């Protein structure tokens, strides 16, 4: 099951209490204070779990607490620090407090690790309160208590390349042709009901991540069809590819389709359509496609590059992969440049 939102309760460990104790030894009637300090409670830590693509586990596991710090003891013994609780989430998970809406962490890379709640501090034992004037203090502190916090996890998958198209355009066929993912493929709309990410292998052990999201329709930004629920999974892609059914099998026209897709992206998030670098003109093995390609090229050829393919029958996709890869590298470079300019200013 694909789950991209979940609420869980997290709690850092309480600090341990400081101890009040006095040395008791044979022949030393009045030993000094020797109550040790309480220890720090454990932290709540979120880490990315590469390969994980759903928050499903959090439907069943909803409470996560770090261990409390140990109490101090006599003979100057400090408590033991409470163990952290490590929560593994899919890369792309945003963690937000439900009461204030504050974003506590954004696990946006595959190796990220964030301490979201810190454990309570331990209280000091009475040994620490001894002074030259007060040599037998009874004073000692309780450990700091922590409160449970309700947080919402929201997943916005992280992929380098996103496929955008109408239902039945062949997005899943293309993803399975290029990557290791095996999404369901079928001749009816809305076969894909949730995003699927595949790894596309390139020479020299390089690779990139490609996401297939459910088909868009006119009005998707208003939640028509499977709607914009899934558009947020392409928000974080570096580049987008439009996938068009050039044969217009469902009685649509690929030229209109492209216009609608561009609009839907813009209406959902301004500027999103500028991330689209290519139009993949799919199903070129079918006869009707040839004429439609001519029209598409005439109307859009100067604005965006069009790559005619047949995801179902082409034998080699090496050239297509290379083309996508190069566009991705360019997008990454532009992004770095932008970041650089931002800091240089
Ligand atoms: N002839 C031909 N059929 C194709 C081609 N690519 C995909 N198809 C067929 O088109 C149908 C839809 O393909 P999918 O890959 O499931 O399409 P999708 O875009 O993922 O569809 P949704 O998941 O419903 O949005 C399937 O029957 C595929 O076999 C192609 O290049 N040529
Ligand atoms: Mg599909």
Image (spheres, rainbow, N blue to C red):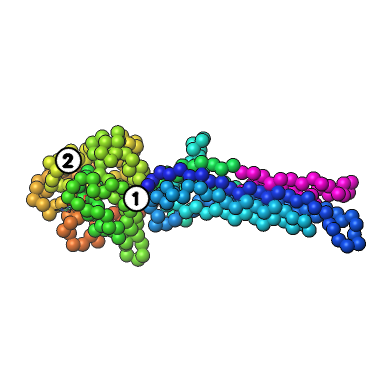
As drawn, 83 above or below 149: below
Magenta stretch contains residue 145: yes
- Horizontal side, residue 48 vs residue 304: left or right: right
Q: Earlier in the sequence, mark 1 or mark 2?
A: 1
Q: Is residue 240 left or right of residue 311?
A: right
Which disc, if any, is residue 1?
1
Crowd around label 1: few <14 · some 14–19 · many ≥20 (10 Å): few
Q: Residue at x 42, y 51 (%)?
A: 57
In the rendered image, which quarter is residue 338 located in? top left
Toward the viewer: 324 or 303?
Answer: 324
Task: Measuring from the top left, give residue 320's x and y in whole percent.
Answer: 24, 57
Is most of the magenta stretch helix, strand or loop? loop
Q: Position of residue 205 (x, y in %)?
A: 36, 65
- Look at discs 1 and 2 and give the one toward the viewer: 1
Q: Which residue matches tag 2?
A: 255
For this rendering, which residue is in front, 177 or 266? 177
Q: Is residue 88 magenta?
A: no
**Residue pictured at 40% horizontal, 50% vertical:** 56
Mark 1, secondary structure of its residue: loop
Question: Which residues are drawn in magenta?
Answer: 119-146
- The residue at the point 13 percent across, 45 percent down is 249
Res. 218 visible in picture: yes
């Amino acid at each position: 099951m694909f789950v991209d939102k979940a609420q869980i309760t997290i709690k850092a460990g309480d600090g341990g209490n400081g101890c009040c104790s006095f040395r008791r030894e044979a022949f030393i009637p009045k030993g000094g204070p020797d109550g040790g300090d309480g220890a720090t409670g454990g932290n709540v830590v979120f880490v990315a779990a590469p390969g994980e693509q759903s928050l499903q586990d959090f439907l069943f596991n909803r409470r996560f607490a770090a261990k409390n710090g140990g109490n101090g003891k006599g003979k100057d013994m400090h408590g033991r620090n409470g163990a952290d609780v490590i929560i593994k989430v899919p890369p792309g998970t945003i963690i937000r407090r439900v009461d204030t809406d504050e974003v506590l962490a954004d696990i946006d890379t595959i190796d990220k690790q964030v301490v979201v709640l810190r454990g309570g501090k331990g209280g000091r034992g009475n040994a620490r309160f001894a002074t030259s004037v007060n040599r037998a203090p009874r004073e000692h502190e309780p450990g700091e208590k922590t409160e449970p916090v309700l947080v919402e996890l929201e997943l916005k998958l992280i992929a380098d390349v996103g496929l955008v198209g109408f239902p039945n355009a062949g997005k899943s066929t293309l993803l399975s042709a290029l990557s290791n993912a095996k999404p369901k493929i079928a001749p009816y709309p809305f076969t894909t009901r949730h995003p699927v990410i595949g790894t596309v292998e390139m020479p020299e052990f390089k690779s990139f991540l490609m996401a297939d999201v459910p088909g868009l329709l006119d009005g998707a930004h208003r939640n028509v069809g499977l709607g914009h629920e899934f558009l947020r999974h392409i928000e974080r892609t570096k580049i987008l590819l439009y996938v068009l059914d050039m044969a217009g099998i469902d009685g649509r026209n690929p030229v209109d389709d492209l216009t609608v897709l561009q609009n839907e992206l813009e209406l959902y998030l301004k500027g999103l359509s500028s991330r689209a670098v290519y139009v993949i003109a799919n199903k070129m093995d079918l006869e009707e496609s040839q004429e439609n390609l001519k029209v598409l090229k005439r109307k859009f050829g100067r604005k965006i590059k069009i790559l005619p393919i047949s995801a179902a029958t082409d034998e080699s996709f090496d050239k297509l992969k290379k083309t996508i890869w190069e566009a991705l590298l360019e997008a990454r470079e532009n992004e770095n440049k932008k970041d650089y300019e931002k800091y240089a200013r």
